[in-house]
Image (cartoon, rainbow, N blue to C red):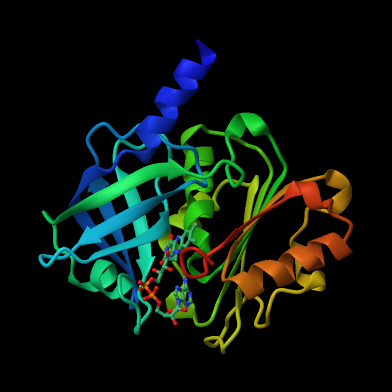
């Protein structure tokens, strides 16, 4: 019986469904959120991703993976896409799509990079660029569940204008059990209070929690960023098993 249920759940995930764009939100000059209506969406855990499939009129097909930005509690599925200028898919999704357009999605996908409030904490979330997307789903889930689990978010971006979800994060930071720290790696505005260098051991130590508190760490971003942060966490005494990583390299890498 259990195998039948598990099989049905797997089949639901691999089914391609039509997603219709119901709202577009410009997040930064190069990133846009697509809010999707996906009939019969099977639900997801914070941290999971889905596959997008675009089919051109001549039958040409392109598929890419995108993390889910919305909380599991939300009725709609949100994606935030960073435009890669010479990319095939992201310039279309982050620039050309209009409300009412439809494309196919398949998911949710991924089981290792997920967090539910019931998993407890503390949690340390470390994002490089658009690697913030699945971590935002975790924070939105945490907020909707009114969880007070100790959560620390460290976001690294090149420039201040590249920071995603700033206003929403500021509002979430009113919660004293959530701390948010930013670092900018290519210059900062005057009176900037955050860090201005790449994530390193000292920065991670300052953000905390200390390894002795045994936080669950979630690290997401470009592959070199994820590897550098995971190595630094191991050097600080965090156990490898507690460090969850998601790499946003090209799909399939
Ligand atoms: C599990 C997973 C989740 C992801 N979630 C998100 C997300 O939430 N938001 C998001 O914007 N992207 C996300 N990505 C990246 C996304 O799948 C695409 O790789 C990205 O949108 C580029 O696709 P493209 O067709 O525009 O570029 P392509 O045509 O595939 O590539 C064009 C050029 O850009 C390089 N490139 C491709 N992807 C990246 C990248 N991510 N960073 C830097 N250079 C790249 C390629 O090597 C190539 O040189 C995720 C990737 C994975 C594997």
Q: Quadrant of residue 167?
A: bottom left
Q: Is residue 168 left or right of residue 147?
A: left
Q: Residue 152, how many percent across, how many down?
A: 66, 53
In this rendered view, identify the residue nearer to me: 216 or 93. Answer: 93
* Residue at the (32%, 55%) spot, across then down: 52
Is 1 drawn above or below residue 89 in the view shown?
above
* Residue at the (49%, 39%) spot, across then down: 141
Q: Quadrant of residue 81?
A: bottom left
Q: Residue 218, how many percent across, how many down?
A: 65, 53
In this rendered view, identify the residue nearer to me: 201 or 18. Answer: 18
The C terminus - image quarter: bottom right
Is 65 drawn above or below residue 143 in the view shown?
below
Q: Residue 143, how many percent across, how many down?
A: 50, 40
Q: Is residue 154 left or right of residue 205?
A: left
Q: How many marks?
A: 0
In this rendered view, identify the residue nearer to me: 87 or 231. Answer: 87
* Residue at the (22%, 35%) spot, across then down: 39
Is 235 drawn above or below residue 3 in the view shown?
below
- In the picture as drawn, the residue positioned furthest to the front comes out as 59
Q: Quadrant of residue 92?
A: bottom left
Q: Residue 97, how many percent across, how many down?
A: 18, 65
Specify the quarter for ligand 1: bottom left
Q: Is residue 225 left or right of residue 106?
A: right
């Amino acid at each position: 019986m259990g195998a039948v249920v598990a099989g049905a759940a797997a089949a639901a995930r691999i089914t391609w469904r039509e997603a219709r764009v119901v709202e577009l939100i410009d997040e930064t000059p190069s990133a846009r959120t697509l809010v999707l209506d996906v009939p019969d969406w099977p639900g997801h855990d914070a941290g999971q991703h889905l596959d997008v499939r675009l089919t051109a009129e001549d039958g040409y097909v392109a598929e890419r993976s995108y993390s889910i930005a919305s909380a599991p509690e939300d009725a709609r599925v949100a994606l935030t896409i960073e435009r890669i200028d010479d990319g095939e898919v992201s310039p279309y999704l982050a620039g050309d799509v209009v409300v009412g357009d439809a494309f196919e999605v398949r998911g949710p996908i991924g089981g290792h990079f997920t967090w539910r409030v019931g998993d407890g904490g503390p949690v340390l979330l470390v994002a490089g660029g658009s690697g913030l997307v699945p971590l935002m789903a975790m924070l939105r889930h945490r907020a909707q569940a009114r969880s007070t689990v100790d959560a620390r978010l460290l976001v690294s971006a090149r420039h201040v204008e590249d920071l995603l979800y700033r206003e929403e994060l500021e509002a979430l930071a009113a919660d004293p059990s959530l701390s948010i720290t930013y670092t900018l790696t290519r210059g900062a505005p005057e009176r900037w209070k955050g860090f201005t260098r790449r994530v390193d051991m000292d920065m991670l130590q300052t953000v905390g929690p200390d390894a002795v508190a045994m936080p669950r760490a979630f690290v997401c971003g470009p592959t070199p960023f994820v590897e550098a942060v995971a190595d630094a966490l191991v050097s600080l005494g965090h156990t490898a098993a507690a460090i969850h990583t998601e790499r946003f390299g090209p799909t399939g890498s």
